Image (cartoon, rainbow, N blue to C red):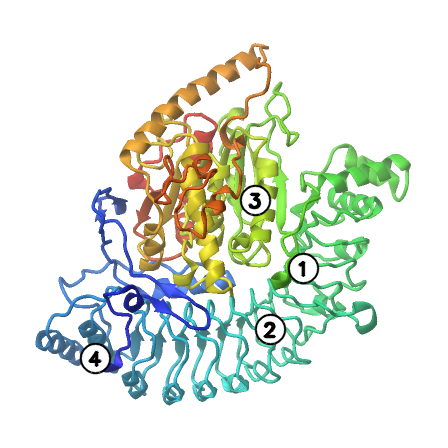
Amino acid sequence: MASQLRLAGAGSLAASSCQSTSAGVRRSPRQGWPVTPCSTHVYYRQHSTASSLTIASSAYSRSSWRSAILEEQGEPPLPPPPQQQRPASGPETNGSREAQASAADAVTNVPQEAPTPCGLSAAELRVKLSLAAGSGRLDLTDARLTELPAEVAELTELQELQLSGNCLTRLPESISRLTALRRLGLAGNLLTELPPGIGALTALEGLWLHGNLLTSLPPQLGRLEALRALSLAGNCISQLPPGCLSGLTSLTDLTLAGNRLTDLPPGELEPLTALRKLALNGNRLGQGRDTGAQGPLPLGMGRHMSALQELMLQGNCLEAVEASLFECPALTELSLADNRLTHLPDRLSGATRLARLHLFGNRLQRLAVRQLAGLPALSTVWLEGNMQLPGADVAALVAAAGLGGMPALKALGLDQSQLAALRQQVGAGGGSAGAAAAAVEVLPRNVRVGSVLEWQGPGPYDTEEQAGGGGPGYFKLQYGPQRPGAPLNGAASSNDVLVVAFGSAPGTPNWGGLLGKVYKAAQSAAESYFDVLYVADPSRDWYGGGSEAAYAYYRSRLAATTRSYRRVLMLGDSMGATACLLFADLATAALAFCPQVDLTTASIRPGRPAEWFASLKRRLMASVAAFGGSGGGGSADGLPAPDGTGDGGGQLVVLVGTWAHDLDQANMLPHATQQQQAAVADASAAGRQQDRARRAARSAGWRDAGAEPQVVGAAVHRSPWAWQQGGEGSGASSPDSSSLGVNAEGTGAGGGVVVKVFNVDSHRLAAALDAQGQLTPLIRSAVLAELSLRGAIVRVSNLL
């Protein structure tokens, strides 16, 4: 049997890496730091000078894997598995006693073999196959398989097969023998196509294929009439053959986000009347279509889609949408953000349950205000970035929001340019001037006005590889309460602390609700003197980290805002956490929850080639290395000081659960040594004392003196791409590499991260902490640290 287990074996680099001739993807063996459990169920990384270190493996949980992949659909987190007493040796199993006895015999009778880079020996894999015969479940996640073992096809009673995170480039036709299979996980492999035999798995209910290299789908896929969940996000699919989806009549969750689709086969989605969630964001839908002559792109939506609740179309190239889109009776959330829409359909009244409507980043020239006001359930509308929206339409909408015309409305998102157009319209006396003037005099509380700077530089999608592949992203600066008497900075704010909240893979802004709780929890006015910059990548492209043009675009837009603030705290989860690391040198502190560092080994990733992933990792590592030179100081344990006597933030903190995938990603990062942390703490303590003295002087009427204003904190922006001059990640020093703090080994003189590992076996750590009421105090403490204020006591033992 050992000959059939095609693993990336140990030894030479070629033998220990997973590679694909077509994509050039390589996967290296796992390395990391030792993790020691504490009595408080929080794991701390121990520092060591040893050159070869390993991380203690954690038991794998199928529920954690499903939690990670369901993030693509935005599902609520699964409850953590109950704590159980684990055996001293041998794998965990849910199989019968006979299967367990067989497994024990297998362990006893086989010679002990050296572990493979994935942490499993060939003997352990044989045990898994033996257990699967009795349990009906086989988990080969992260086993670095390059071929599916032939013995798997003999397990004809198998109901669940997990192959996520391997190196599979193809599936054998023998997969068709697993006719009892109900769940098949293939995320994060190197698959370029699916065999026709996939259509024989008629009992399949869940199929997860995100993070592969698929370019098309077989028509036989449409035979899976029992399929309920299908995830195809982050592939390279440019077209769908007719019939590959139309037969999936039981489908409730479908995600095709982050592919290259320009259109859909006529009527392909119409039979899918059981759909509850449909994600088509981050494609190229509408590209090359003459909307004036051909009309809007048909998507097959309408009243017959009676179960559809969420429809995500952001980050495409749509110039118009069908009126039938607003006729889905159960639709509660619709995102059309970052397209090229110039208008909405005149008839919107069919969407009686529509509560959340995302329209930011379009080219709207008119707005059907009366139709929007007639949507009884509409609670949030986001219109920022529509620079051509007439002031009369904005005035009418604000009046409806403030005078009870939209009774369910909780938030209407506008930007300052729209507000200026509104005031100009009111000043000219046009439109319904009376009602609008009353509303504009004092804006209603449900109108959220932020700053969206009109960008004059190059866009992220000017290259051939991504022409028309999405919009310019979401950049909205939301002002908090302003410090009285303080001068305005370059962002027209008197605050000097900024929180940058990066959106995750769904491509819509998040963290807003949590940061709202932080504002409400303020015990004094000084605790609310910070602004928030919401950033999202609707194209689901990891903020362009592997593309020179897209990376330059996102970095330039971030720097245009962050340079005006003395302190910058970055927040992000999953894809947003990767952005925290990618742009860490623009911040003074960061909290990154479960980031992806090396996308070649990640299950949640965009459909990009290996060279793109390598470029992102090089940029990310250089930014982390440079963080120590631009950031402030941090507490000795990496979290904000609980007693307020810390250093005012300044540490790059990576927070992960016990899921092995996230631990592996965190272990790839350079870590801040205790000596560096102590040095940073000393420097930051002095800086915080200066901050307090400066504030005291300002309150007394004094102003900063000096011939030239000194740029401090996050405003010290080095040459953004100087590190690239040293070659393709070779680590060789360049003339400008010292300015980024990058030494010959590719690590920063003052950079590095502090890793915190919590006893949560899931990729969705932030959601788990939030569910237990611990996320808000954690973020609030980090904000107060940047404000140089005494934070609420958040003991590590109380976090979980």
Q: Sequence-wise, which precedes: disc 4 or disc 1?
A: 4
Query: Taking 538 as reference, is 7 above or below it?
Result: below
Q: Sequence-wise, which precedes: disc 3 or disc 1?
A: 1
Q: Look at mark 4 in the image and give the residue it sits on.
A: 2
Q: Look at mark 1 in the image and give the residue it sits on.
A: 336
Which residue is more in the foreground, 594 or 172? 172
Please name the residue shown 41% across and 73% down the image: 186
Check disc 3: other Cα within 10 Å, few if <14, some if 14-19, many if 20+: some
Quarter of the image where one finds residue 111: bottom left
Q: Look at mark 3 in the image and give the residue it sits on.
A: 555
Percent x, y for residue 779? 44, 39
Residue lying farthest to the right in this orientation: 429
Query: Taking 222 as reference, is 733 above or below it?
Result: above
Q: Quadrant of the N terminus?
A: bottom left
Q: Sequence-wise, which precedes: disc 2 or disc 3?
A: 2
Please name the residue shown 86% across and 40% down the image: 425
Q: Determine contact: label 3, label 1, CB under 8 Å.
A: no
Check disc 1: other Cα within 10 Å, few if <14, some if 14-19, many if 20+: many
Q: Look at mark 2 in the image and give the residue it sits on.
A: 238
Q: Amino acid at mark 4?
A: Ala
Which residue is more in the foreground, 105 or 546? 546
Cα–Cα gap, marks 4 and 1: 52 Å
Residue 43 seen in the figure = yes
Cα–Cα gap, marks 1 and 2: 20 Å
* Disc 1 secondary structure class: loop
- Closer mark to the observer between disc 1 and disc 2: 2
Q: Amino acid at mark 1?
A: Leu
